[in-house]
Image: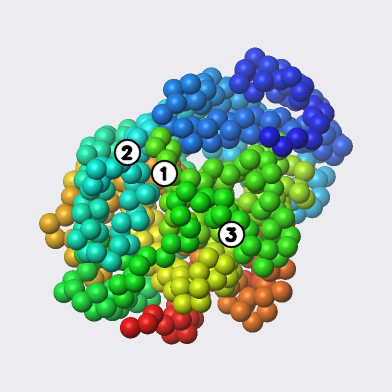
Amino acid sequence: MVATAARTFVPASASPADFSQLEPLYLQLLDRPLTSVADIEAFLRDFSELSAVVDEYGSRRYIDKSCHTDDKSIETAFLQFVEQVEPKIKPLYFRLQKKLLDSPALDQLTGERYRILIRQWRADVELFREENVAIETDVTKTVNEYDKINGAIMVNFRGKEYTPQQMARFLEDPDRAMRKEAWEANTNRRLAEREKFEDIFEKLLPLRERIAANADLADYRQYAWKSKKRFDYTPEDCLRFADAIAESCVPVVARLNAQRAKDLAVPTLRPWDLDVDPQGRQALRPFAEDQVPLFVGKTREIFQRLSPALASDFDQLGTHHNLDLDSRKGKEPGGYQMSLEESKQPFIFMNAAGLHRDVETLLHEGGHAFHYLAAAGREPLVFLRSAPMEFCEVASMSMELLGSEHFDVFYDEADAARAKRKLIEGIIRFLPWMAIIDSFQHWLYTHPGHTREQRTQHWTALLDRFTAGVDWSGYEPARESSWQRQLHLFHSPFYYIEYGIAQLGALQLWIKARHDPRQALANYRAALALGGTRTLPELFRTAGIAFDFSQKTLRPLMEAMGEELDNVPSPS
């Protein structure tokens, strides 16, 4: 564990697991006069320290729960914090935010960072309702049910048990019969949980609808927009983005799928044909599943080539034991970077299984880690360290693209080019999927009271609109329930459009880096260091890119990716 800076307000002995030890600190802050700028600055400094202590404790409990979904004591500690500490802190946190906003000295604060903070806190105060605290706790507990089921899923395949992440290896095998058998085994195992996932989701929807109604908003979409501080774009902008993707991306994916079917010499593509190399070459294997240290070392070499400063930042994760990368039974699926606010360190969680996608994932989460370290090293207030998610994902997606220029660390020249092509194709294919998930959420939360059948019908209609060239006949139940594997739908509604907006930003930065890599990386790092102290358009501008996700930006980026695919041809 990394040594943290000495506390000046929170006693070193205070336990964040015990609300009775935290409450006097919140009350002490509430009792302070805020009649001058000096008062406000001291108040924010101490409030930030207290928030960092509590936040890191909660993050650690979440990380532990993710790493060990089958450990009852860890689950108990997580739920104890969720049920006994967080709900009691939220009203006090709200009162402290309101105290600042009511200060007669508020208008004496100067500087952009304070303007941003005040704008954000006003949105929080306007949304807060004490009756929602218990509902939010119920949401967290219900999402934990989803995570437990996911973490327990193991697939029996040819006499052995695998996690779903490990099963992905077989979908890259040139043997089509094996791919089909593996895909069916994985899919049928998830289908066995379909009704449980439906039940969980149907618990979540009305809870979130009540949260929005309690805040005097028409629907949960309005609530999400305000709670996510989306000051710079509207729901209608997102739907227009989806229209642009349908026009510019979907036809390209259809052509890629047609070429894939031709290369594979199959009459139609099936779901198990999407990950295999179309020329029948063995799957890219950057490292063996039991070689995670080698994986870490080679990823570090990519960072070193980009910038020694990035490699040094990456070293901090290993030094402080903040990497959990292997895939194993009892571990939650997926990957994330989590910020440890008191330690001022990032933590990376993922499920490495020896796949090329693992390389992309660690580059991605590494970008998030660099973002946090740059911001935390500069910004003293925990409230202003995190940028809007639309830019946080620029940090991570840019690192995937910049890192792709150095895939030769893992592969020979031919396979490095192949891996880069795979990344570019993956981005083109991702954008329609992003549009599906985002559009689905717009429908879900603006159609309260819909039935399972209506939900399924709308999901399949979106698939029909944004996908092309894959034959699912005979596997309709799997297609109809494929939304259940997207964790964001359960965990964080409306958190997915950020990936699409950020992808366009990352592509712009990557194109600039091809012409001037030194300046592009300097702009990137300058923008990361701003944390959450600037607006989205300003962060994009500092990075040297445009905050725009209309057809105006999308079309030329699609053309650039097409040119890149031509430059990195797939051998026939």
Describe residue 191's horizontal placement relative to residue 94 as left or right. left
Q: Find out whether the residues at labels 1 and 3 contact each other: C-beta distance under 8 Å.
A: no
> What residue is shown at x 67% (from left), y 75% (from top)?
517
Which of the numbered marks, if any, corresponds to residue 333?
1
If the image is split into quadrants, where does the C terminus sit?
bottom left
Per the image, the residue denoted by label 2 is: 153
Q: Is residue 27 above or below residue 370?
A: above
Per the image, the residue denoted by label 3 is: 299
> Which amino acid lies under the numbered mark 2 shown in the image of this protein?
Ile
If the image is split into quadrants, where does the N terminus sit?
top right
Q: Find out whether the residues at labels 2 and 1 contact each other: C-beta distance under 8 Å.
A: yes
Please tell me in which quadrant of the rendered image residue 206 appears.
top left
> Which amino acid lies under the numbered mark 3 shown in the image of this protein?
Thr
**In the rendering, at what x and y percent does residue 196 appear?**
26, 35
Mark-to-mark CA distance, 1 and 3? 21 Å
Q: Is residue 491 above or below residue 404?
A: above
Whether residue 231 appears in this view of the structure is no
For marks 3 and 2 on the same chain, the one whose residue lies earlier in the sequence: 2
> What residue is shown at x 62% (from left), y 30% (from top)?
57
Dot 3 crowding, Cα within 10 Å, few <14, some 14–19, many 20+: many
Residue closest to the eye, 94 or 260: 260
Mark-to-mark CA distance, 3 and 2? 29 Å
User: Marks 3 and 2: which is nearer the front?
Assistant: 3
Describe residue 559's horizontal placement relative to residue 541 as left or right. left
User: Marks 1 and 3: which is nearer the front?
Assistant: 3
Helix, strand or loop status at disc 2: loop
Helix, strand or loop status at disc 1: loop
Q: Is residue 390 above or below residue 157?
A: below
Helix, strand or loop status at disc 3: helix
